[in-house]
Structure formats: C-alpha cells, structure tokens
Image (cartoon, grey):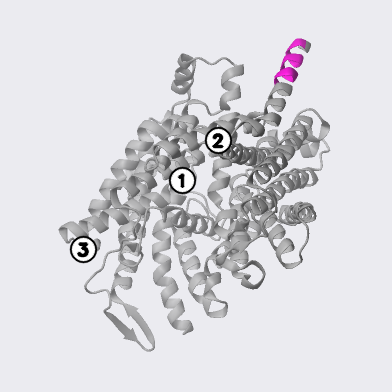
Amino acid sequence: MVVEMRRKAIVLIVLVLIFLVLPFLVSGFWVRLVTGIFMFAILASALNIIAGFTGYAAFGNMIFFGVGAYTTAVLMNKLKFPFFTSLILSGGVAVLLAIVLGLLLLRLKGHYFALATLGAAEAMHQIVNNLTDLTGGGQGMSLPQMRGSPFVLNLFFYFLMFFFLVLITFLVWRLSKNRLGYAFKAIRANEEAASVMGINTTYYKIYAWSLSGLFTGFTGAIYAYWFTYIDPPTVFDVMMVVKMFVIILIGGAGTVFGPIIGAFILESISELVWAKFINLHLGILGTIIMLVVIFMPNGIIDLVTKKRSFKGIIKYLRENKL
Amino acid sequence: MLLQAIVNGILYGAVYATIGIGFSLVWGVMNIINVAHGSFIMIGAYLSYTLFAVYHIDPFLSIPVVMLVLFLIAYAIQKYVLNLVVRGSVFITLTFTFGLQILIANICLLIWSADFHSVKLSYSSLSFQIGSVIIPYVRLGIFLVAILLTLLFYLFMRKTKIGIAINATALNLEGAKTVGIDVGNIYAITFGVSAALAGAAGALISPIMSINPFVGGNLVGKAFVVAILGGLGSTVGALVGGLVLGLVETVGTIFISSSYQELLGFVVLVLVLIFRPQGIMGKRFY
C-alpha cells in the first residue's frame, strides 16, 4: 500500500514537472492546445464535484462559465478593473449564483434537477442576450487585450490554467479523503439515509454546487480574457456540458484523476479527427461517444484497475442486455 | 391582437404536443432522455423536403412514408444497440443519445449540406378570416393533423395489445417479463413509435420552418419543456403542455419584447419544476 502510494506520488511529480517545462519546448500551437485541454479538465473536475461525488447531474453548469466570463468582461470593460480582481470577483458572483439557484433547485431530484439547471442556464443565456447595454447582446463583447508578445501570452494562460487545474485536483483529492467528501458521497448513495444520520443535506448540496460553480466561474473568466471576445451562444453552450459528461464518463465518475485523463483522451481524439477528417468530425466523435458508453460505462480507470478483458466486457454486456 | 395571438398559440401548440409526446413516451417507459429526439424530427423534415423537391409529393401526403421510415430506423437502433445499455443510469443513455444526435447531424450535413431548406407550398399564402383573426390554411391543416395523430396515439396506447404491453412494461419490467412480454421488442417498438411521431412532426413543420442539420438541439429543447409541463407519461398531459408552451410563447410576446420569447418557455419550465415537479397534469402512464 505504501509502495503503491509512493509510486503514484512519483508518477504525479514527474507529470507536473513535464507540464512545467513543456511550454518552453513546443510551439505556440501545442501550448494553446494543452491550455484548452487544461480548461476542459478543470470544467470536468468541477462538474465531477456535484455530479460525480454528490450525484446531482447539473446539466446547466455552463451558467457559471457564462456568468464568470461576462462578469470579467463587464468589469474590465466598463469599470476598468484589472484582470485578477475581475477574476476573483467572477468566482464570487458564480458562488452567489450557485447558492441562490441551489436554494431553489437542489430540492429537486434526478432528471428534474438536471432539467431545471438546464432551464436556468438557458434563461440566463437569454437574459445576457437581451441586456444589450451591459453585455452587447448577441453581438458579443470584446475584452482589452493583454500586453506582451504572443509567446508571453501563451505562457501566461497556460500557467494560469495549470495553476487552477492543480488547485482543483488537490481539492478533489482532499474531498476523496475528508469528511466533507464523505458527506457528498453519502448524499449520492442515499440522500434520505444521509439526512437521517445527521448530515444537513441541503447545506452540503449547496456547498458542493458552490465549489463546482466557483471553479467553473474562474475558468469562464480566464477563457474570456484568453480569447478576448465572448458571445452568449459560446459561453452558455449546453453542448459543452454534455462534452464534460462524456469526459467524466471516459475517465470515471467520482474519481480524482478521471476527469483529467478523460479530458486528455477526448480532446486529443477530437483534435486529431478535426485535423484529418473535417467533414466527418462530428460523426466520428458521436460514434466514439456511443462506443465509450457501451464498452466502458465506468470509465477507463475502472477498466485498468479491475483489469477487465475484452471477453469480460462482452460477458458483462450479455448479462446486462435487456 | 390578443385573440390572434391565442389562436396562433393553439395552432403552434398542437405541433409542440406532437413533438413532446414521443419524447415523453420514451422517457416515461424506458427512462431514457432522448437528446436525439430533435434529430428524428429533423430527419422527418428532410425526408418530407426531399419527397417534395424530387417527386413533388405534398408534405401532408408524405407523412405515412416518413413515419414508417423513422419507425424502422429507431426500431433497429433500440433493438440492436440501445437495449445493450438501457439498464444503465439515465446519464449513460443520455450521453449515448447525444452521441447519436451528433452522428445524425453529420450524416444530414453530408447529404443535405449546411444550407437552410424548407418546403415552399403553392397554397402557403392562402388564408381565411374569422372576425379579426387570420388563419392560414396550412397552419390549420398542420393543427388538424397534429391533433389527429395525438388522438390516434391515445387510442393506440389504450386499445391495442401492443399499447397495453408498453404500459405494462413501463409499470413493471419484471412483471411484464413474467407474463411473457418480449420486453426487448416492446422497447424497440416504443422507441420506433416515438420516432415515427417525431418524423410526422418534422413533416408537419417542413412548410413553416427552415431546417439545417443543427436545428435538432433547439427542437429537443421544446420537447423537454412540453414533457415537463405536461408531466411524464401522459398523452393528455403532453397535449396540454404543448398548448401551454404555444400560448406562453405567442401571448407572452404581446406583453414583453419578442426577443424574450425563448426565455419565457424556460422560465415557465423552471417554475413548473419548482412548484409542481410532477407536471400540470401530473399522472404517470398512458
């Protein structure tokens, strides 16, 4: 067990070191690509806290991304706030939103919750779309560009995303061990039982969603400053959440590193397919999603740790077939 | 003005009901949130468009053909693929249908290109007037066919052996197996019927709405709202849900700017979910 832990720690340290030196060795294209993968990994990890740990499938999680992006855009444009102040305030706004929405929506269960969050996100999308004076409406909004050479800019956003990825991964790792995390998991396993055992389920559900919203909001803010242009359909894109769910499914729901592994796998495939077969890009992606669901519904971590063979999978499918 | 909006709302609402019924059926019976439902509607609209453009067949006449094609496609998907994962959690099946949706979008893109298409009927501008209310014949026809389909579906679920078997399977899967129902087949039929209704809805909207390969997502949003508004698993509920959505969208825009039209539907959805999660009609099973 100790040997196992030490081996894992070494692998982790080596990986972190690789990612620290990587941007100095490869071209700007690759730096931006990996920054994008980091972004998806953070978003998927954030969703993992509420969906994977707590069992509440927040299909509208992009609401925090959009609100984070727009908060930063408005603060930097209209009030001339510096980026880091805007970033932190964006996180704060996302948390406030999570608390208010959580009080309203988190008493719904199962798909009703999923759909209500979707409705809320779509409603927010329309509101931002219509607040033309503040947000520029459907025309979108440009942000002030950061000064510096492209190389410096690439490095800045790479390390900013990387910092948040390490931060959320550490947090989720702590959650997998501490009381707070156990409370989340107890809610997923059986909410009534958790409540009977003295867990204030409403409080913990809102806590989980706020954490999820905080990091999604931060990511939205970074995205806005990184791309220097945002518009409502992009930052409130529901399909992004579905993509995050696929990432979590590929990696393994409720695990610490699953979402990161999933993000790397899906985004690499996506990039490869995009470059080689632009006409069939969506079709291939769709087929991969369906195959993942059929052949590894518990994620790749489960596939590796349980050493499932191909025969085993087929047997499992036969047994579970209707 | 208000009267016209109410009439428009009701005319729209019947189509929304047709869109919602199939979606709510699949959800209620198999616990699958079928994100690809919008894609089935889209395929229906494309088939109807192609039959019109190539063979000059009126969309109203091509409905049976479209329904049959959609039934067969969906039957095969459920029977040979979806039944493998249908016992998994709802997010497994939801993600699966999402994959299906983008695959269908890609196929439609290759066949029909990304351009917008719609059926241009020679009689689309004809209308009649009752008092101050103008009713185009096409919209009235669409309304009547949508109501007819809803009625036929209601009778199918209540009076036919297969309909009763679907109800039985929805109520108790193990029980249905015990009395000798081939549930795999029933699931496939359920999915097929749902897709057939979606296809019919697609053919119905083809004269009044332009489609491209990416409208599926928008359409499935409507199906969501209708299914939730009405309450899962009730034909009458879906009809009520469709009419409510139609009315909210048209009447609501009299009072607030029409750019909020989409928002209204979702606000009503969230409110219904908070205050009456079982839906307006709130009764399970057909």
Q: CA distance from mark 1 to mark 3?
A: 29 Å
- Asked if A170 appears above or below B2 in the picture, the reply is above
Residue A10 within the segment the image draws in magenta: yes
Residue at the (31%, 61%) spot, across then down: B117
Q: Are marks 1 and 3 in contact (CB under 8 Å)?
A: no
Residue under pointer 3: B58
Observer-nearest of B228 and B134: B134
> In the shown orientation, is residue A146 left or right of residue A197?
left
Crowding at mark 1 (Cα within 10 Å: few <14, some 14-19, many 20+): many
- In x, y percent, where is residue B172? 49, 37
Amino acid type of disc 3? Answer: Asp
Q: Which residue is mark 2?
A: B89
Q: Marks 2 and 3, how far apart in space? A: 42 Å
Whether marks 1 and 2 lie on the same chain: yes
Q: Main secondary structure of the magenta part?
A: helix
Name above or below for residue A313 compared with residue A288.
above
Q: Which mark is residue B161?
A: none
- Callout 2 amino acid: Ser
Measured from the top left, where is residue B106 in percent x and y? 37, 45
At a point 56% along the width and 54% down the height, the residue shown is: A234
- Counting residues from the start of the chain, the first of labels 1 and 2 encountered is 1
**Pick the front one: B133 or A63:** A63
Query: Identity of the amino acid at label 1?
Result: Asn
Q: Residue furthest front?
A: A149
Residues in magenta?
A3-11
Occupied quadrant, residue A277 = top left
